[in-house]
Amino acid sequence: MSGEDVGSGGSSFYIATAGKTNPTYDYIGYDANGAVRGFARFPRPTKFLFDQLIAAGDTFRLKRMAYAKGGENGNTPGKSTQAEIVSNYVGVPFGIASGFTASSSSYIGPSLITKGVFNAAYILMTAAEVQFNLAEAKQRYASVSFAGTAQSYFEEGVKQSFRTLGVPNAAANATALLTSGKDLSDWSASTDKLKAIWQQKWLALMNFGGLEAWTEYRKNNFPNIPQANTVTDTKRPLRLFYPNTEGGSNAANVSAQGTIDVFSTRLFWDVD
């Protein structure tokens, strides 16, 4: 599993026919004929994400996670309309209501959406996530009988993240980050090893596991994500509501949970 991503679909699974393309491509990319979808300009990476990557000198993954402002060049699929230099990667601050138009900010990049690539595999779990899970288990419980070390799993997780994102010369560029001397990127330079694992796992989940990334954040209270600009209350959601369908098919057990407040009612494992 360390070298593969677990998913469904591939070049022989999806076809360029309405309703039969990769569903992510169809929803926030293009239709089967290559026309831009209405939601294609809606998901925007955040300024916080870009700041984290740029501070680490991790522009290799930045340019695969997002397009430069103005988005994809329709005549050169997988390439940005604007020059792919750091200053052209503009993330949106949390909660901002205006001022960041499609032409002035970045949106989801070629690792997930490239015009014409309607048949990309639908990833359920990445090899990077597996490696970071192993790294955290080994770091927390040194006695577990894994063949590798926490460091070896951590470094393999970063390398697999680069590979899944499609970074050119992935192994070499990942190694450059891993030996950069940067806290939370270079194992030896990181004073808190668990935070380094959490940071890199959070980054590796970008574009491929948003809900999982949010769950990791709730579990670890890390990274230190800023509050949205439009929110004055310091409370943040701790859980999701049960869907209405659950109330209809499993009402007794839903009612047994009592009144649920998503800002205060914790799940059983959320002890802090």
Image (tube, grey):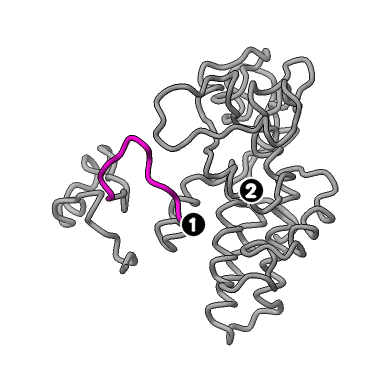
In the displayed orientation, state which residue is furthest to the bottom.
Answer: 143
Residue at disc 1, secondary structure: loop
Residue type beneath disc 1: Pro
Q: Horizontally, is 178 left or right of 23 in the view?
A: right
Q: Position of residue 128 (x, y in %)?
A: 66, 57
Q: Residue at x 72, y 65 (%)?
A: 181
Residue 223 numbered mark, or none: 1
Residue 163 numbered mark, or none: none
Q: Quadrant of the image for the C terminus?
A: bottom left
Residue type beneath disc 2: Leu
Where on the picture, by quarter, is residue 172? bottom right
Q: Position of residue 215 (x, y in %)?
A: 43, 54
In the picture of the structure, the residue carrying the numbered disc 2 is: 53
What span is colored magenta in the figure?
Answer: 224-234
Q: Earlier in the sequence, mark 2 or mark 1?
A: 2
Eyeballing the image, is 29 above or below 62? Answer: above
Q: Position of residue 126 (x, y in %)?
A: 64, 52
Q: Confirm or deny contact between disc 2 and disc 1 (CB under 8 A).
A: no
Q: Position of residue 96 (x, y in %)?
A: 41, 30
